[in-house]
Image (cartoon, rainbow, N blue to C red):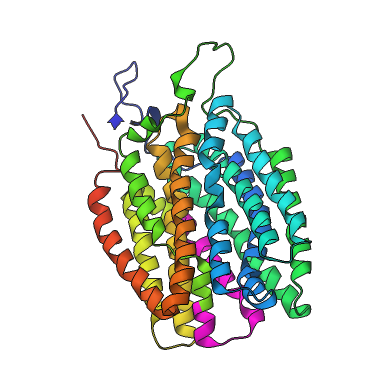
Amino acid sequence: MYLSVSDRNGGKKDEQVVTAGRTRRSGTRFKLSHTIVWLGVVSMFTDVSSESVAAILPLYITGFLGLSVIAFGVLDGLNQGASALVRIAAGWTADRIGHPKRVALAGYGLSAAARIGLLFAGGFWSLTAIITGDRIGKGIRTAPRDALVTVSAQPEHLARHFGVHRMLDNIGAATGPLLAFFILMLIPNGYLTVFVVSLAFAVIGAAALVLFVPDLRAGGRRPGDTRKSQAFAFRWGMLREPGLGRLLIVAGVLGLLTVGDGFIYLVLQDKNSFAVQWFPLLYVGTNLVFLLLAIPLGRLADRWGKAKVFITGHAALLACYLLAAMPFAGIGPTLGCLVLLGIFYAATDGVLAALAGQLTPVERLATGIGAAQTVVAVSRMAASAGFGVLWFAVGPTTAMVAVGCLLAVAVAASPFILHGIGQEKRVA
């Protein structure tokens, strides 16, 4: 809600917003934090590492290694959701110790170590172990990192600050597949070279976090506070925070109907029959749209409503499914799918973290963000594994239409469930 604060002379100061236990000014100019910029740079290098591998993974698994589409579904499910195993625990730990940077660094380090394993992997089970380790690293770092973004941002511009971070993140997400494309163009079947480059960028990202990001406190016990607080004992009761439980329900249902990018790209390749070395450029296209729209949609979410933008992003995903399932091929439908998929990510990724942070008290900030991210990760893991089986049973087009129909119902119902969430109300 908004409160007016008067100075000693009777004049009114800037209005303040009180949301989830935090007081914040409204109407102030947007000022970007150096911490958020450096966190974005860290994410940029890390995403060059991860997305260069993700861009070749579908072809590496189904083409180079000769595994089935069901095996790819399982591995893609792990890639989407293995991070869920630790997200809440990592967020709770960051809140408990009050040093989210330290927890985030452990996650970045684990992901970098997993890149070494890629140099020696050659089968389903070794890839399963490596992808699981990498995604657990992602799960450890994400909520503490987003908590650092939240405490470094101006609260009234929270989604916009997340948009800046995600923009920098997606410079890396677009660069990674582009690197993979050039490597495969120069070195046919040069998957090992891609893995080496991926490792180098992962190490650079972790080093940037150590050297340039301050160890800010977010939640946690302050020095001299020796009392045992219930705030640091994780309880499912925290999900009864106003609006947070409803947000998790909607995010979980929509996540169950979110097909992994790799499947959409495999559908597009099957329709267009383009050469395999062009495959990574599909990831580049999606991430470029994400990059261009992250800040504008974050700003729109702050003004129009975070829940509204979040739902609109899933409507764009629905349009992507339907376009991918159409019987006609060509550059137009392909580009349309990439644009719609980029809109989906720009409207949901940072916006979900900002919305969860807004609905969570500051002393449990990383835990609340981690809970939202866990629900999405688990549901998307189930979605990828299930879609792989559905593809195998009925074919890609029918599977895409079936999931699209279910998503249409979920998108239509979401505004009623999230009514009033993400909108501060002005009071006298």
Residue name at image x 63 percent, y 62 percent: 51
Residue 389 is situated, as x and y percent measured from the top left of the image, at 47, 70
- Compared with 343, 375 (above or below) is above
Can residue 206 be seen here? The reply is yes
Residue 304 is situated, as x and y percent measured from the top left of the image, at 31, 51
Figure label count: 0
Residue name at image x 29 percent, y 66 percent: 408
Residue 139 is situated, as x and y percent measured from the top left of the image, at 57, 46
382 left or right of 422?
right
Quadrant placement of the N terminus: top left
The one of 277 and 161 positioned closer to us in this rendering:
277
When asked about the image quadrant of residue 262, the answer is bottom right
150 left or right of 19?
right
206 left or right of 297?
right
The one of 200 and 135 positioned closer to us in this rendering:
135
- Look at the image and say whether residue 349 sits in the magenta stretch: no
Q: Mainly helix, strand or loop, the magenta region?
A: helix
33 left or right of 256?
right
The one of 161 and 401 positioned closer to us in this rendering:
401
- Compared with 426, 77 (above or below) is below
In the image, which residues are magenta? 267-296
Can residue 48 be seen here? The reply is no
- Compared with 269, 38 (above or below) is above
Quadrant placement of the C terminus: top left
Residue name at image x 76 percent, y 80 percent: 188
Residue name at image x 62 percent, y 44 percent: 39
- Look at the image and say whether residue 278 sits in the magenta stretch: yes
- Compared with 118, 56 (above or below) is below
Residue 36 is situated, as x and y percent measured from the top left of the image, at 58, 43
When asked about the image quadrant of residue 44, the answer is bottom right
